[in-house]
Image (cartoon, rainbow, N blue to C red):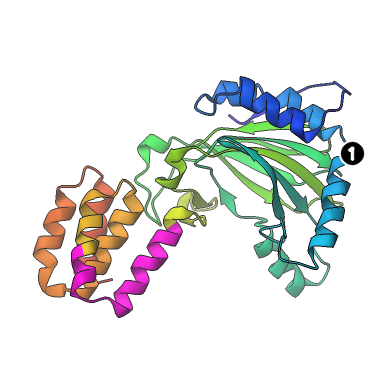
């Protein structure tokens, strides 16, 4: 399950100290090692000076192009090898229902999702968002939208200032809800090479199914592939078939073969044959369904 750490330390460190600690002591491939950064992350969260300095620098950078926030919610503050330190903001939803709906989408409130990377998080400011946490067995999931998944409820909790939690990759699911007052958190994210080849899922908690895919590198690959379904040519078909046979990402293989089928329906037998040789049953199932639907 997602882990909670109690570190009563009041010691404060600088961001550079934390990065040095990650570089020297933490193995990104080992979840327990990643978790051992939790006390140092707590010490970083005790530093209430460095975040205002960073935000002040953002005011200056607004006059130019060097702007750190890559979404309206998040900013990568620094990176060290396979690790990144990220700041997240968690606003209170507007009392206006229309505005609140837009905000919820922007800040991913209510969207239950897992992670294809390990991360440790600490409340930096405020009472923290509320979250409901579940777990599932990734080895029993093919990964298609609408697939039933056995979700086990673990706990409902918050992330107030000073509380540290760690989430397991491919296991812990959480949905986040608006805090009662503006809040901020700090995360240590692990950039594992595997994360570019695997999916993060959205889940429908009421029906216990996979409801979608979280934006990722594989989603960007699929976007390019789907565009070729509209403007692709014969060369595209050959390249798509190669991807469908060889790419390490299951979702990329599925999209490549489906798009090849869309461009060349006459090759359906060949394309389905490729899918049947795939080690992952999701590829075969997706292509068989595409043929039944007459393409994509």
Residue 102 vs 230, above or below: the answer is: above
For image coordinates 23% across by 73% down, the residue present is 262
Q: Is residue 284 left or right of residue 81?
A: left
Check residue 165 for magenta coloring.
Answer: no
Is residue 22 visible from the viewing direction of this image? yes
Residue 162 vs 106, above or below: the answer is: above
* Residue that numbered label 1 is attached to: 48
Residue 31 vs 52, above or below: the answer is: above
Give residue 192's position: percent from left, percent from top.
49, 37
Q: Main secondary structure of the magenta part?
A: helix
Give residue 209's position: percent from left, percent from top.
45, 51
Give residue 273's position: percent from left, percent from top.
11, 56
Residue 266 vs 285, above or below: the answer is: below
Helix, strand or loop at label 1? It is: loop
Quarter of image, res 156: top right
For image coordinates 27% across by 76% down, the residue present is 232
Give residue 272's position: percent from left, percent from top.
15, 59
For image coordinates 68% across by 56% down, the residue present is 109
Location of the N terminus by quadrant is: top right
Few, some or many residues within 10 Å of mark 1 (<14, 14–19, 20+): few
Q: Is residue 223 left or right of residue 275?
A: right
Residue range highlighted in magenta:
219-238
Quarter of image, res 252: bottom left
Quarter of image, res 45: top right
Location of the C terminus by quadrant is: bottom left
Check residue 223 for magenta coloring.
Answer: yes
For image coordinates 51% across by 51% down, the residue present is 203
Q: Is residue 206 left or right of residue 262?
A: right
Numbered-mark total: 1
Q: Is residue 82 left or right of residue 49?
A: left
Residue furthest to the bottom: 231
Is residue 293 visible from the viewing direction of this image? no
């Amino acid at each position: 399950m997602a882990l909670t750490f109690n570190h009563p330390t009041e010691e404060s460190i600088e961001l550079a100290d934390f990065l040095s600690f990650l570089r020297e002591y933490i193995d990104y491939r080992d979840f327990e090692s990643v978790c051992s950064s939790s006390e140092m992350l707590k010490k970083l969260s005790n530093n209430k000076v460095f975040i205002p300095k960073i935000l002040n620098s953002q005011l200056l950078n607004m006059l130019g192009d060097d702007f750190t926030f890559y979404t309206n919610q998040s900013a990568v503050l620094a990176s060290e090898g396979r690790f990144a330190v990220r700041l997240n903001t968690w606003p209170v939803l507007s009392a206006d229902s229309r505005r609140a709906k837009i905000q919820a989408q922007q800040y991913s409130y209510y969207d239950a999702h897992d992670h294809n990377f390990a991360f440790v998080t600490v409340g930096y400011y405020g009472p923290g968002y509320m979250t409901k946490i579940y777990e599932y067995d990734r080895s029993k999931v093919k990964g298609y939208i609408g697939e039933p998944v056995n979700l086990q409820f673990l706990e409902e909790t918050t992330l107030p200032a000073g509380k540290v939690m760690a989430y397991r990759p491919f296991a812990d699911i959480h949905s986040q809800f608006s805090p009662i007052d503006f809040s901020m958190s700090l995360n240590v994210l692990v950039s594992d090479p595997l994360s570019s080849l695997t999916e993060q899922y959205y889940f429908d908690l009421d029906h216990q199914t996979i409801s979608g895919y979280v934006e990722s590198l594989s989603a960007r690959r699929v976007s390019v592939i789907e565009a070729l379904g509209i403007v692709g040519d014969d060369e595209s078909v050959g390249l798509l078939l190669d991807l469908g046979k060889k790419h390490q990402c299951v979702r990329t293989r599925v999209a490549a073969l489906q798009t090849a089928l869309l461009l060349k329906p006459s090759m359906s037998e060949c394309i389905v044959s490729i899918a049947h040789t795939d080690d992952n049953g999701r590829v075969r199932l997706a292509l068989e369904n595409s043929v039944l639907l007459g393409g994509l």
